[in-house]
Image (cartoon, rainbow, N blue to C red):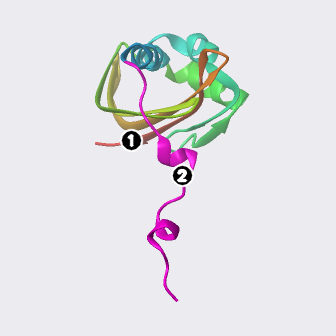
Amino acid sequence: MTVSTATATRPAHAAHKSGTLSPHEQGILWDMEEHFWTSGADNARATTATNAVMVFPYPPGILQGDQIWTHLRERTGWHSVAMAERRVMRCHDIAILTYRVSAEKPDVPIYKALCASTYLNDEDTWLRISHQQTAVN
């Protein structure tokens, strides 16, 4: 039995048609991401979907919904952040930002991590639906 090349090629699923964001949209999302780190839990909550999921180094680990805000109230307010190795991927109304962060605040060691945040464009408003951090040395 032979398989035609048309049958053997990848199907045209939406995930195979991913792209990127305009420079303006990228600027909006990167600003939101920086403020997620530096502007406190109330700002982070305002730009995050109600039942979002976040994964932090253990503890606390995997958090969802209101669990996130208990954790972030104690751990936000970084004085400065530097985001390197930035990458953006878009598929329809979903955008994923990935980056390496170095964050500083008084009396705390510099925090370094690999991060990924997923945003949903919901009626022309971007909302974070997930965030993940992997601590690195």
Q: Give how far across and how far down residue 46 sits, in percent.
A: 63, 13
Q: Examine the rendering and report whether any part of residue 97 can be seen.
A: yes
Secondary structure of the residue carrying tag 1 is strand
**Residue in the image at 56% along x and 33% along y:** 92
Mark number displayed over residue 12 = 2
Residue type highlighted by circle 2: Ala
Q: Is label 2 in a helix, a strand or a loop? A: loop
Amino acid residing under circle 1: Ala
Q: Is residue 74 left or right of residue 23?
A: right
Q: Is residue 4 left or right of residue 23?
A: right
Please report the residue visible at 49 percent of the width from the left and 60 percent of the height from the top. Answer: 10
- Residue 26 left/right relative to 137: right
For residue 110, say whether it is visible. Answer: no
Mark number displayed over residue 63: none
As drawn, the residue found furthest toward the bottom would be 1
Residue 30, by quadrant, is: top left
Categorize mark 1 by other alpha carbons within 10 Å: few (<14), some (14-19), many (20+): some
Q: Which residues are magenta?
A: 1-22
Residue 32 coordinates in the image, percent (x, y): 48, 15
Q: Residue at x 46, y 19 (%)?
A: 29
Depth check, front residue: 60 or 63 = 63
Q: Earlier in the sequence, mark 2 or mark 1?
A: 2
Magenta highlight on residue 12: yes
How many labels sit on residues? 2
Q: Does the magenta segment cover residue 68?
A: no
**What residue is drawn where x is 64% and y is 29%?**
68
Q: Which residue is mark 1?
A: 135
| Residue 116 x/y as whole percent | 45, 36
Q: Nearer the viewer, mark 2 or mark 1?
A: 2
Mark 2 vs mark 1, CA separation in Å: 36 Å
Q: Position of residue 129 (x, y in %)?
A: 61, 31
